[in-house]
Structure formats: C-alpha cells, structure tokens
Amino acid sequence: MLFLALFFALNLSAQEKPVKIVFDVTSSNTKVHQAAVRHVKMMAQAYPESEFEVVMYSGSIDMVLKEKSAVASDIAALVKNKNINFIVCEGTMKRHKVDKSQLISGIGTVPDGILEIITKQAEGWGYIKESNNN
C-alpha cells in the first residue's frame, strides 16, 4: 500500500514539472488559429509554472491583426499572463505590409519566426506544429 501511494505521489509530481513549449502557426485557417489558442489556454491552466510561446509567420499573419483576427480577444487576454507570449515574424509583417500598430496589443515581434523556433528548440523547448488535419 505504501508503494502504491509513493508511486502516485511521484507520478503526480512528475506531471507538475514545468515545461517550455513553442507553438508553430503558419496557416491562414481560422480553425487552426482557434485550436492554437485553445491549446495554449488549456496547457497554461494545467501547467501554470510552465512557459508557452506561439510563433506566427507566413499565412498566419491575420491571426495577430486587430481588424482581422478571429481570436483577437483570446490573444489579448492570454498575453496578460507572464508565461505566455505571442510572437510574429517581422519578415512576414514586411511581406504583408503590416505595421506594428496593426497588431493586437501585447504581440511581440522577432526578425525571423523560423529562427525563433529553432532557437527555442536548441534551448530545450518542446515543439508543437499547429495545422489543419481535416
């Protein structure tokens, strides 16, 4: 009986260990945007000591635009958490002629979204590719 209690205690503490996860979003599909936000929200609630970063580039640019995003209010709420960052690629912004003033408040930028993801992975962050799997 003591072994069983110890096993469950160790198993629970292992699941509570903080993690670091970077989410890769490139799709223009709003269902993918909604799924990414849902995943970050659920994981941040389950693992409040963990860190999460959503990196958007390529076709996902509308996800971060005040006037076009289907998830703007969710992102605005999530970026208020110190352990959640939403980051957009400046190269993508330049290609789509997007100015920082068009971004949802709290969105960060990096020169290169792909390099940001590679850097996070090199630092030991887990990786999740958000995509449409219909």
Image: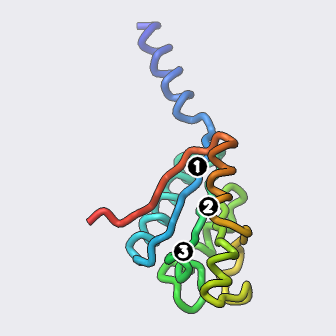
Q: Are marks 2 and 1 in contact (CB under 8 Å)?
A: no
Quick one: label 2, few (<14), some, or many (20+) residues within 10 Å? some
Q: Which residue is mark 2?
A: 114
- Distance, label 2 to label 1, CA atoms, is 15 Å
Q: Secondary structure at mark 3?
A: helix
**Among the two numbered marks 1 and 3 on one chain, the one whose residue lies closer to the N terminus:** 1
Q: Secondary structure at mark 1?
A: strand
Q: Position of residue 33 (x, y in %)?
A: 46, 72
**Among the two numbered marks 2 and 3 on one chain, the one whose residue lies closer to the N terminus:** 3
Q: In which quadrant of the rendered view does residue 32 lie?
A: bottom left
Q: State whether residue 11 is above or below residue 115.
A: above
Q: Position of residue 3 (x, y in %)?
A: 45, 8
Q: In which quadrant of the rendered view does residue 28 lie?
A: bottom left
Q: Which mark is residue 75?
A: none
Q: Which residue is mark 1?
A: 21
The residue shown at (53%, 49%) is: 127
Q: Which image quadrant: the N terminus?
A: top left
The residue shown at (66%, 49%) is: 120
Q: Along the line of sight, which residue is nearer the eye, 76 or 92?
A: 92
Q: Which residue is mark 3?
A: 58
The residue shown at (57%, 53%) is: 44
Q: In which quadrant of the rendered view does residue 126 lie?
A: top right
